Image (spheres, rainbow, N blue to C red):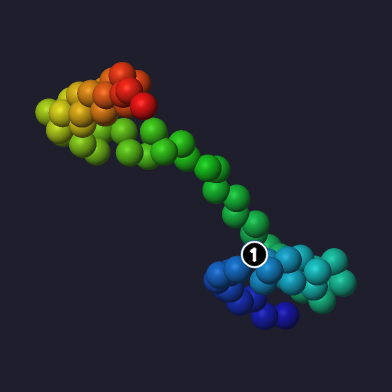
Amino acid sequence: METVLVQINNNKAYRLLEDLEDLHIIKVLKKSIQPQQKLSEKYAGKLPADVADELQNYVTQSRNEWNNRSI
């Protein structure tokens, strides 16, 4: 038996490998499942505080203008 490393670029390819495993043709040795990281955790602290404050003020002002618009 030979062990090879395979990069999966498509979910369909992974399903094919699972089907081959079900047929006892191959054996998947490692199924790596990476937990989904929240975007808030991923990007926490990426903006300098002054830029973040300016952005927050802009968003607040924009929301106020949107809510106070007269149509």
Tell me if mark 1 has few (under 14), some (14-19) or many (20+) residues whose alpha carbon lies within 10 angstroms of its own: few
- Above-or-below relation of 4 to 63: below
Q: Which residue is mark 1?
A: 11
Residue 13 position (above or below residue 36) = below
Q: Can you say whether 23 is above or below 62 in the image? A: below
Q: Residue at the right extreme?
A: 23
Give how far across and how far down residue 58 sits, in percent.
20, 29
Q: Position of residue 64 (x, y in %)?
A: 28, 20
Asked which quadrant contains residue 31, the reply is bottom right
The residue at 15%/28% (across/down) is 54
Residue closest to the eye, 57 or 42: 57
Left or right, 12 with respect to 63, comes to right
Quarter of the figure with the N terminus: bottom right
Q: Quadrant of residue 48?
A: top left
Percent x, y of residue 2? 67, 80
SS class, disc 1: helix
The three-letter code of the residue at mark 1 reads Asn
